[in-house]
Image (cartoon, helix red, strand yellow):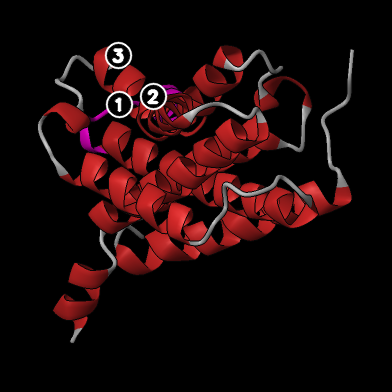
Amino acid sequence: MSMLIDLLFDMDWLFLVGTAAFSISGYLVGVKKRFDLLGVLIVAILTAIGGGVIRDVLIDRVPVVFRDASPVSTIIATLGVAWLLSLHKDWNAAMHRVFVLADSIGLIAFSLAGAQVGIDFGLNLFGVLCVGFITAVGGGVLRDVLVNDVPFILDRDFYGTVAILMAGLLYAAHALGYSGTATLWTLFAVGLVIRLLAHARDFRLPTV
């Protein structure tokens, strides 16, 4: 039973959850900007894989998306579902809430997935925080720059701070011997609650 749970909820699944969530996030940004079909597709793919590609280049390995078909397959399947659900029809308050939820899921999933890559590569705390942060926010930054928006990490919602926090918590849990599926998904749930609460309460770091 324990092996079945590990198989169903391992790091690969967390990575794919983040990929699907960021695909929706990018898709909705393209819809909001009223891009054509190709424009929406480019923004969605960039959001979903951008952070991981930057991370892999930094740690000197071939990007996962060039070796494993599952990320691209997940993106295509997710965009197909989004189209069938008519998420492209109008940008309204409900779509904004869907965007926040999808972007938050992607942020937390990728911060943990990126941090785990850093741990697997034997990086120190600073290295784990960096690769976790880059994996989580890299695609969103590329997306926002591409569509001429100010990236979230610069001024909104405790966004980048949550990514760093979750990467640090995973590193600490691993150092204390609490690595594994239960720890990973517990941190995911905790991080998602923190991120959504920060957005709802408009938590921000002090401005300069």
Image quadrant where residue 30 sits = top right
Task: Name the amino acid, label 1.
Answer: Leu
Q: Residue furthest left?
A: 67
Q: Is residue 34 or residue 187 the one in the foreground?
A: 34
Image: magenta residue range: 120-132
Percent of width and height locating residue 52:
33, 28
Q: Which of marks 2 and 3 is in front?
A: 2
Q: Which of marks 2 and 1 is in front?
A: 2
Query: What number is the disc on residue 182?
Result: none
Query: What number is the disc on residue 58?
Result: 3
Query: Where does label 2 land, which residue?
Result: 50
What is the spatial separation of the Cα atoms under label 2 and label 3, in whole angstroms? 13 Å
Q: Where 70 sits versus 132, above or below? A: below
Task: Name the amino acid, label 3.
Answer: Leu
Q: Which residue is depicted at the point 54% across and 63% down?
A: 189
Q: Is mark 3 on a helix, strand or loop?
A: helix
Q: How crowded is the residue under tag 1: few (<14 C-alpha within 10 Å), some, or many (20+)?
A: some
Q: Which residue is depicted at the point 20% across and 81% down?
A: 2
Percent of width and height locating residue 4:
17, 79
Q: Tell me if label 2 and label 3 are in contact, CB under 8 Å.
A: no
Q: Which residue is depicted at the point 60% across and 56% down?
A: 192
In this rendering, does residue 168 appear at all?
Answer: no
Q: Where 7 sits versus 17, above or below? A: below
Relative placement, left or right, of 150 versus 66 is right
In this rendering, does residue 113 appear at all?
Answer: yes
Query: Where does label 1 land, which residue?
Result: 123
> Of marks 2 and 1, which one's residue comes earlier in the chain?
2
